[in-house]
Amino acid sequence: MVWEVALVILLLVLTVLVILLIPTVVNLFRTLGKMSVTLDELNKGLPEILDNIAEITDHASRVTRKVNHTVNDITDFEQKISDELKKPVFEAIATLAGLLKGSQTFLTYFIKSKK
């Protein structure tokens, strides 16, 4: 008899639990339906989005290549200018240093000869 009462109570509890879970299951199915609609809309627009992303990526790659090419050209130009200017500048500095040293020597001996 105790087992029969326990079984009846267990069945009542399970029945109440099933009744309480019905709205949750219904909401779950509604949510799944909405998710399905949202995914369908996303899948419809996805090719266009991917095309836009590919176009933007291609444009960014072209800009990057142009910038790299320009930077390389500027670097080459700067190197050529630097190479062309170094030799004349160093020659002018060496000539000026020689003139100063010669002038110093001349003035030193000129002043000594006056004394």
Image (cartoon, rainbow, N blue to C red):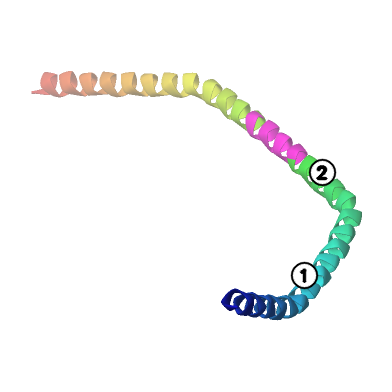
The residue lying toward the viewer, choosing from 14 and 100, is 14
Q: Is residue 67 magenta?
A: yes
> What SS does tag 2 mark?
helix
> What SS does tag 1 mark?
helix
Mark linked to residue 59: none
Whichever of callouts 2 and 1 sits on the residue coming sooner in the sequence is: 1
Marks 2 and 1: CB-CB under 8 Å? no
From what the image shows, is residue 48 above or below residue 113? below
From what the image shows, is residue 60 above or below residue 69? below
Q: Which residue is mark 1?
A: 28
Q: Nearer the viewer, mark 2 or mark 1?
A: 1
The residue shown at (59%, 23%) is 80
Question: As drawn, which residue projects farthest toward the right?
Answer: 44
The disc labelled 2 sits on which kind of residue?
A: Ala
Q: Taking 21 as reference, is 39 left or right?
A: right
The residue lying toward the viewer, choosing from 53 and 72, is 53
The residue lying toward the viewer, choosing from 113 and 69, is 69
The residue shown at (82%, 43%) is 54
Q: Taking 82 as reference, is 32 left or right?
A: right
The residue lying toward the viewer, choosing from 91 and 57, is 57
Residue 103 is drawn in which quadrant? top left
Range covered by the magenta-colored residues: 61-72
The disc labelled 1 sits on which kind of residue?
A: Leu
The x, y position of residue 92, in whole percent, is 43, 22
* Total numbered labels placed on residues in the image: 2
Mark linked to residue 54: 2
The residue shown at (89%, 58%) is 40
| Magenta region, main secondary structure | helix
Question: As drawn, which residue projects farthest toward the front?
Answer: 1
Q: Taking 38 as reference, is 18 left or right?
A: left
Local crowd size for mark 2, using a 10 Å CA cut-off: few (<14), some (14–19), many (≥20): few
Residue 71 is drawn in which quadrant? top right
